[in-house]
Image: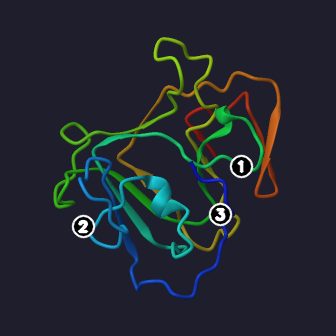
Amino acid sequence: YYTGSVNDNNTNCPAVTTWYVDVQTTIEGDGTSAATPAKSIGAVLYSSCLKPGDTIKVARGTYTPSYMPGTSGVRDRTFFIDKALTFLGSYDSTFTKRDIQTYPTILSAKNGHPMLNTDHFYHIMVWDVKDTTLEGIIDGFIFQDANANVNSNLVMNGSTYSRRSGGALYV
C-alpha cells in the first residue's frame, strides 16, 4: 500500500493526459498507454505525474484501496483523490470497449476475513478536490463492501472525515 505524500512533485513526467489501469495485465507498465497499463489504481492515482484534468481508464476486475494516511489503521485505506479527474471504469483489456455489465470494474473495501464485514475499510473512495475550477467525473464503477461503522474521525490532507458515513464514496 501507499503511505507517501499525495502531492509529490516531479518535473520528469511523460506528456500524457490519459492513464490506463488493468489488474489482470501480465506485465505491469507505467500506465501511460493502453499497451502498458499499470496493475493498480494506486500506481497511477498517487503518481507525482498525475495532473488535474487527467483521465484514468480502468479495465474490468476488482480493485482494493491502497492509500493509508499517515499512521492510521488499516481500515482507513482508501482511494484518495485530491484533484479534479475523469475516473472511468468498465473497460475491456484493450480499452476500446466499455460496458459495466460485460466488463464490471469493482472497487471493493473487503479486507481480512471474507465472511466478516467488521474489518472492511471505512471508505472506498474519498474525493477531496479543493480546486473547483475543474470538474471531476466518476463513472462505470461498482462500489462494494465498505463499512463506515465507527464514531470517530480521520484527518487527511487538512480535512476531517467521519468514519461513520460515506462508506462507498466520501465527498
Residue 105 spot, x, y in % from top left: 33, 42
Q: Secondary structure at mark 2?
A: loop
Which residue is located at x 30 percent, y 63 percent? 37
Q: Which residue is mark 2?
A: 34
Q: Which residue is mark 3?
A: 6
Of marks 3 and 1, which one's residue comes earlier in the chain?
A: 3
Q: Amino acid at mark 3?
A: Val
Which residue is located at x 27 percent, y 45 percent? 60
Cβ atoms at labels 3 and 1 below 8 Å apart: no
Of marks 3 and 2, which one's residue comes earlier in the chain?
A: 3
Residue 156: mark in rendering: none
Which residue is located at x 24 percent, y 67 percent? 34
Graded by Cα atoms within 10 Å as few (under 14), some (14 to 19) or many (20 or more), the crowding at tag 3 reads: some
Q: Which residue is mark 1?
A: 69
Q: Secondary structure at mark 3?
A: loop
Q: Amino acid at mark 1?
A: Pro
